[in-house]
C-alpha cells in the first residue's frame, strides 16, 4: 500500500495501537487485527504497511519526530534460526506433551510461555521438521523409544508397563479406596439433593412471604377504610343527635306556644261567661 493512501493521523493511530498492544503483552499480529477492525483495512495490508513505514521512518527522523513516533518502541527482532539440537529438543518435548493428551498447538503454547507469536514460530518449526526433515524426526522418535515411550507413525504412546499381580494389601487398599469413593459419591449426591430441596423450599418461602406481604398490605388498606368509615359514622351520629335536639326544642316551643294560646282563649271564654251571668242577674 502506498504511503500516500495513509494519512498522518492513521499512521499515528496505527503505531499507538501497536505500542498499547505491546504494553499488554499482545502479539504484533493481534495489534494488526485490532487496528484492521477499527480502520476497516485488511490485517495483511496493515502488517505490510507497518513494516514498510518503519523502514521509511528510519530514513526520515524528522518525520518520525513530527508524528511523535519513538522508533525504539518499534524495534523488529529477527528470530534466530533453530540449531539442530534446539530442533531436536523442541520436537521431543512436543511429542512428550502429545503423549499426555495435548494438541500440538497447546504443547507449543506451553513451550512459548503463553506468547502467541513464539507459539506460532514453534508450531511452524515442528511441522517443518515433520514435513521436510524426516531424518531428524526419526532420530527424535528413536531417542523417545529409548527413553521409555512407545511410538507409531507420528503418534507417541506411553510405554506399556510389565504386568504386575496385585498383592492382598493392594486389593485391600483398592477396596477401601472404592468404599471411600462410594461414600464420597453418596455424600455429594445427598448434598446436591439437599441443595435442590433447599432451593425449592427457598422459592416456596419467598412466594409465601410475597403473598403474606400482599395480604398485609390489603389488610392495612381495609383497616384504613374501616377507620375512615368509623369517622364518617361518628360524624353522622353527631349530626343526627343535633337534628333530634333541634327538633325536640322546636316541638317543645310550639307545644308551649299552642298551650298558652289555648289557655288564654279558655280564660277569655270563662271571663265572657262570667260577665254574661252577672249581666243576667242584674236584669232580674
Image (cartoon, grey):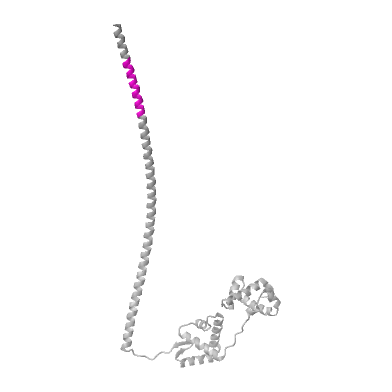
- Relative to 234, is 4 above or below? below
Q: How many marks?
A: 0
Name the residue rendered at 32%, 86% in the picture. 171
The part of the chain drawn in magenta is: 252-271
Front residue of 71/93: it is 71
- Relative to 193, is 247 above or below? above
Main secondary structure of the magenta stretch: helix
Residue 52 pos. (x, y %)? 66, 78
Residue 63 pos. (x, y %)? 70, 75
Quadrant of the snapshot with the C terminus: top left
Quadrant of the snapshot with the N terminus: bottom right
Q: Is residue 58 left or right of residue 230?
A: right
Name the residue rendered at 62%, 74% in the picture. 16
Name the residue rendered at 37%, 50% in the picture. 223
Residue 232: which quarter of the image?
top left
Residue 182: which quarter of the image?
bottom left
Q: Is residue 253 magenta?
A: yes
Front residue of 198/156: it is 198
Task: Residue 180: tell me if it is visible.
Answer: yes
Amino acid at each position: 500500500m502506498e504511503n500516500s493512501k495513509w494519512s498522518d493521523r492513521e499512521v499515528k493511530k496505527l503505531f499507538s495501537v501497536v505500542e498499547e498492544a505491546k504494553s499488554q503483552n499482545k502479539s504484533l499480529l493481534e495489534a494488526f487485527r485490532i487496528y484492521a477492525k477499527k480502520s476497516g483495512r485488511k490485517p495483511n495490508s496493515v502488517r505490510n504497511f507497518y513494516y514498510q513505514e518503519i523502514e521509511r521512518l528510519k530514513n526520515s527522523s524528522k518525520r518520525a519526530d513530527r508524528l511523535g513516533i519513538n522508533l525504539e518502541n518499534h524495534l523488529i527482532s529477527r528470530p534466530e534460526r533453530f540449531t539442530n539440537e534446539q530442533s531436536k529438543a523442541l520436537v521431543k518435548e512436543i511429542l512428550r506433551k502429545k503423549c499426555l493428551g495435548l494438541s500440538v498447538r497447546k504443547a507449543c503454547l506451553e513451550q512459548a510461555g503463553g506468547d502467541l507469536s513464539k507459539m506460532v514460530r514453534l508450531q511452524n518449526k515442528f511441522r517443518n521438521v515433520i514435513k521436510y526433515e524426516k531424518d531428524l524426526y526419526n532420530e527424535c522418535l528413536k531417542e523417545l523409544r529409548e527413553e521409555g515411550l512407545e511410538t507409531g507413525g507420528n503418534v507417541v504412546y506411553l510405554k506399556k508397563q510389565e504386568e504386575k499381580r496385585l498383592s492382598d494389601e493392594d486389593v485391600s487398599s483398592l477396596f477401601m479406596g472404592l468404599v471411600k469413593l462410594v461414600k464420597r459419591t453418596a455424600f455429594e449426591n445427598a448434598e446436591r439433593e439437599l441443595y435442590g430441596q433447599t432451593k425449592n423450599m427457598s422459592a416456596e418461602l419467598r412466594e409465601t412471604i410475597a403473598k403474606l406481604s400482599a395480604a398485609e398490605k390489603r389488610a392495612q388498606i381495609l383497616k384504613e377504610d374501616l377507620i375512615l368509615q368509623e369517622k364518617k359514622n361518628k360524624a353522622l351520629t353527631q349530626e343526627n343527635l343535633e337534628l333530634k335536639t333541634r327538633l325536640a326544642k322546636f316541638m317543645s316551643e310550639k307545644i308551649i306556644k299552642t298551650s298558652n294560646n289555648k289557655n288564654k282563649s279558655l280564660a277569655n271564654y270563662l271571663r265572657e261567661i262570667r260577665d254574661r251571668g252577672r249581666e243576667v242577674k242584674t236584669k232580674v
